[in-house]
Amino acid sequence: MKNSFGNNIQVTLFGESHGEAIGVVIDGLAAGLALDLDHVQKRMAQRQAKGRISTQRHEPDAIRIVSGWFEGHTTGTPLTILIENTNTRSKDYERTRYRLRPSHADYTAFAKYDGFQDFRGGGHFSGRLTAPIVAAGAIAQQLLEQNGVFIGSHILRCHSESDHPFATDEPTLKEQILRLNDLDFPVLDEESAGRIHAVMEAAANDGDSVGGIIETAVVGLPAGIGEPFFDSIESVLSHLLFSVPAVKGVQFGLGFDFASYYGSQVNDAFCVQDGQIRTVTNHNGGINGGISNGMPIRFQCVIKPTASIFKEQDTVDYQTKEPVRLQIQGRHDPAILHRARVVIDSVTALGLLDLCCTNQAYQGMKKGECQ
Amino acid sequence: MKNSFGNNIQVTLFGESHGEAIGVVIDGLAAGLALDLDHVQKRMAQRQAKGRISTQRHEPDAIRIVSGWFEGHTTGTPLTILIENTNTRSKDYERTRYRLRPSHADYTAFAKYDGFQDFRGGGHFSGRLTAPIVAAGAIAQQLLEQNGVFIGSHILRCHSESDHPFATDEPTLKEQILRLNDLDFPVLDEESAGRIHAVMEAAANDGDSVGGIIETAVVGLPAGIGEPFFDSIESVLSHLLFSVPAVKGVQFGLGFDFASYYGSQVNDAFCVQDGQIRTVTNHNGGINGGISNGMPIRFQCVIKPTASIFKEQDTVDYQTKEPVRLQIQGRHDPAILHRARVVIDSVTALGLLDLCCTNQAYQGMKKGECQ
Amino acid sequence: MKNSFGNNIQVTLFGESHGEAIGVVIDGLAAGLALDLDHVQKRMAQRQAKGRISTQRHEPDAIRIVSGWFEGHTTGTPLTILIENTNTRSKDYERTRYRLRPSHADYTAFAKYDGFQDFRGGGHFSGRLTAPIVAAGAIAQQLLEQNGVFIGSHILRCHSESDHPFATDEPTLKEQILRLNDLDFPVLDEESAGRIHAVMEAAANDGDSVGGIIETAVVGLPAGIGEPFFDSIESVLSHLLFSVPAVKGVQFGLGFDFASYYGSQVNDAFCVQDGQIRTVTNHNGGINGGISNGMPIRFQCVIKPTASIFKEQDTVDYQTKEPVRLQIQGRHDPAILHRARVVIDSVTALGLLDLCCTNQAYQGMKKGECQ
Amino acid sequence: MKNSFGNNIQVTLFGESHGEAIGVVIDGLAAGLALDLDHVQKRMAQRQAKGRISTQRHEPDAIRIVSGWFEGHTTGTPLTILIENTNTRSKDYERTRYRLRPSHADYTAFAKYDGFQDFRGGGHFSGRLTAPIVAAGAIAQQLLEQNGVFIGSHILRCHSESDHPFATDEPTLKEQILRLNDLDFPVLDEESAGRIHAVMEAAANDGDSVGGIIETAVVGLPAGIGEPFFDSIESVLSHLLFSVPAVKGVQFGLGFDFASYYGSQVNDAFCVQDGQIRTVTNHNGGINGGISNGMPIRFQCVIKPTASIFKEQDTVDYQTKEPVRLQIQGRHDPAILHRARVVIDSVTALGLLDLCCTNQAYQGMKKGECQ
């Protein structure tokens, strides 16, 4: 439903980049949850722009909870988070209102909204809309962690540079996840971090931009989560992931590499470990038939290079329908990988929390406890 | 919502591989639509197994419309399609009921349904459930075609062999799509078809299986379709695509290749062609900000190698929790790429038709015609 | 969503009165539920027509479960029930296809479906569509009973005759409910039953019809069920109740009588009984702020007189737009109160079961058991 | 879904009576709608408390639109309205936190939210939550009026006093509706207004409260709106109406009076008027089979007497589980009928607008215009 998502935990997103405020309503949270709001704010900061490789638009992004929160706990009714837009420089956009920025949503917004869209800073299409997503996602992530489920992401690749992949054994993986969640520049290998940072800076210096791949892992999700046919874990997560601006591909487990193998090479044999059924390998990324199998969930997203570059580009003026040259002004990110991973963690948390709650909805029915 | 999908055109799927019948309810179709049921049946046949490279389970898959159809037109109320299961050999499965087939949903079904799942032939997880999807999708595809929207898919890659990619110019692309929809083995280049078929046969002979990549294109979709934030075209299509068994990755436009480029290399410049705003390149696969831009929609799905192979595998007996060797019996597909493309076309049609109807829901409001 | 209802237990209804089959898909049932299918069939029989005061269309209404049921238990995937239409006499309707039957949905169906509706026997608007509702509702009712929740209804009033109202003390009320569920003609007081039956017969003899009021009670529903703001118990139940053909009014507790009292007369004071918080009176019908308070749920529905009467009536021919006289033929019910109560019990069960499951969805979240 | 409602026009409600702010997100509005915000504010004022017969809590209830509004038009993305809570006197409630106010949601909130609810002023259950409903509803009403659909309500009855019923001829009815929308005390007959006001004042003087019946009419809704089976007009409107605090009964057309008539007396015969098919009478309130028939929609809601009275009452202390006497303090309404009618108009507008948009979703499909 357009700007709402979720069956039992529903988030509703609103706002435009240069409007008065952006925000999110989270409905379905149980009453009496004690949340760490400082941690939410810390995640907001990780999403925020920093340094040479990020936009110079800096805002506190202070979250303001206006409902659903009382005496340090959730109330059980909708929790609403507002983030005021304070540092807007809309004039940067007035001049080029009708000049369609290539690979942005400018033209499609015209096609859909007939020119009534709030064009300033990309309006509702702005990456800024991911701020309330992160606020909601940080809360979901806390609740999952209280249930033993941990989510983390790193920059696996940026242009020509790569990080180490995630570990395959679960204890190491969990350590990596916890460490990543404290890093502002989320790369597993320190040396890789330097090289990736350098690629981003080079792009920035050149007025250009770079993309890359984010790898995400989830540990602690029990077997049995996910709802076939249509609400497979892959379906729900990809739905949310592709909502994140700039994501153009999602793959689980081996993903597109599956195309090159024989079944006998990539089937995940079952084994018993400490009395638990596990798989020897995890090519399927922890998901069989759309349902978690107790192994770590693993997936990757590709983030395309930021569409805003400072190089001059060919485009069209929407009003005159004439070709024009466009030189984008304003404050932009040469790379958003380090910022996007918080958003990816966040939508992952929202999707999994909703699936966990949905799974729970019918469990009591057969025990005579459906109340 | 589990087995239902769609906001204005909703499909509800039901059935198990060896149950009495499988089927689908389609709600939201306008009254008075004349459908070509022979064409629906033809699409069912394309999804069906054929020859050496497919399962030997053959069923007519005759569709029976039990509601919503009267005097050769839709009635406007739910259209329900039943497909009886006629050729079931459930005994193949009894013997191995508790032997978890690697990379199948056997274990996750136990985890979720506590042993009450209909295990025969994979039950609700069977690829057979895609038959009603195709029936519904064929109807959606007809309606889109009446509105000038055409969808087609081909096997871009299978193991080590590749087909030509789709053409980039739209008239050629449309021709390719129309031709593919008539082919049983959907490959653009005839020579590639032979090589791909040979790879599949080799796997079959070896008791093994292969996967690959399906490439899909849509022409004729007008600009302005898709609903940010959460119901982007990518979100809605990927949600449906990942519901299809064996799909483990989805990418739009350049997809994962975006990771290797600079923004200046892959931004799609706008131009004017015959008075229409178009893009010079189409790296974004026809979608900006989650909304169609009038260029062809292009995406790829990876299909993992069929999990059912005839080679002996290591696994676990769910009851005894002991390791066992498993030799799968029964009738299975060494490759499903040629069958899966009909399913991919079908869910694509269902997703796009729903988004078209949703887009239409609010258009009359401002003209004083919201009735 | 048109023909689907429910968030965690979703029913999808399909079929037309004279089509091939009618049916329902129930999604969200837990796996492993043992259902008493004979009891479901018994409820179907109670809904069925009988004797002089009911239609002469008699069908076995045998339910056929085609999915979601295996080895005597639910499988956890969609349970689909089919009921074949066997005893249709469509010719009764051909002759009067364009003659709009007063107070039927004939004209509104033309307005909505442009003449493509299946007009035979009222098509999708037929009371016959309540048969699959009863099949689904009987299942929901069994599950609620296994959880200690009991639902029953009786004919409180029919034209000029009345039954005793339900008892106010809970043990007696529960006894009444259990007794009613075994009666074909659901009236609490035997003498009233005779008088009500006589009123119906008199109407039948006169080629006329009568309506009345059904009173429903639910015991055993724990406090805390219902989801403000929009999914109050009253909202969810009234939504379903008004879907039942012929229901034109719904009132909870004192209902419309509240208009005549002072607050001091009708507020329900709290008290403590056996350590439980209860209310001294129950004018609010067990619901405060949309949520159950642990007292019996009580509500009434008015059923308008059956629209099909055998007296000649003024109407219009839709094709010619000319006034015509109409003499309805066919098989019709002079009263449907005794049949409707099973339908009312059924939708009540479906609504409450869904709310119970929704309530359960988020309860584990705070205990670290959200899985 | 709890605090969201609507398929194509979705409202999401949030806030608590004494929290920071209350508000609503409206998703699905077309872009480019010019709204009269002064009129929205006027409707807010009509909902506001005034004079001796209303609470003394006075707040400007100034609406603040924080998203979806740009240069005097809707943007097509979510429109969010905030109303800050400024005049809260929470101390009135601290003292009686555990004293369950009879017929309020205090106890059910404890049962559902385990004491974590924001109890101040009723929290999320407060009538104050109807303020954002009115803001959203006023917008929906404007859009319907631009499409020729007009909604109005009056106090039909209050305790022992009654107003004239609505006129039966449509031109007079439309005049009445337009006049009512300008009145602060919505009664058709001036003399009745005086008597009804006097009843309310008498209750106020006595520290007591009164309820009554609101009658609502809609003119201009074309035939064909409403979605069987589950989304009948009656179902959708009653769902919303029963969400409004204090509504305990809803009836359409003759409503509960249907119980006393023969079918031959209350069937609405069809006739032709100015080339249009109409009904001679309108006992069904403009709805047949859940779909509008082009006649005025007519329904009534009963509003129970305000639960807050100043007379001492028996109740229970939730903490001690001991009986206590309760003397409610604070600022309360002895009657809310005159305020509630704006809320009833508002939810009616939201429900009908959503149904109109849903109806439009599939209309273009058959003309090859589904875009």
Image: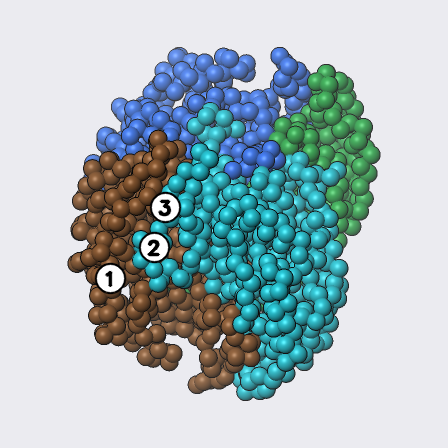
Chain colours: A cyan, B brown, C blue, D green
**Location of residue A142 with respect to A52 vertically, above or below:** above
For residue C57, which quarter of the picture?
Answer: top left
Mark 2 residue crowding within 10 angstroms, few (<14) / some (14–19) / many (20+)? some
Residue C51 can be seen in this image = yes
Residue B192 pos. (x, y %):
26, 72
Residue A24 can be seen in this image = no
Q: Amino acid at mark 2?
A: Gln
Q: How many marks?
A: 3
Give D371 or C311, whichever is nearer the viewer: D371
Which residue, as the protein is rendered here, is positioned at the far front?
A191
Q: Which residue in the structure is indicated by mark 2?
A: A265
Chain designation of label 3: A
Chain designation of label 2: A
Mark 3 residue crowding within 10 angstroms, few (<14) / some (14–19) / many (20+)? some
The residue positioned 37% from the left and 72% from the top of the image is B219
Q: CA distance from mark 1 to mark 3?
A: 23 Å
Q: Which residue in the structure is indicated by mark 3?
A: A269
Residue A51 pos. (x, y %):
71, 68
Q: Which residue in the structure is indicated by mark 1?
A: B200
Q: Amino acid at mark 3?
A: Ala
**Location of residue D226 with respect to D199 vertically, above or below:** below
Give D349 or B244, whichever is nearer the viewer: B244
Q: Is disc 2 placed on a helix, strand or loop?
A: helix
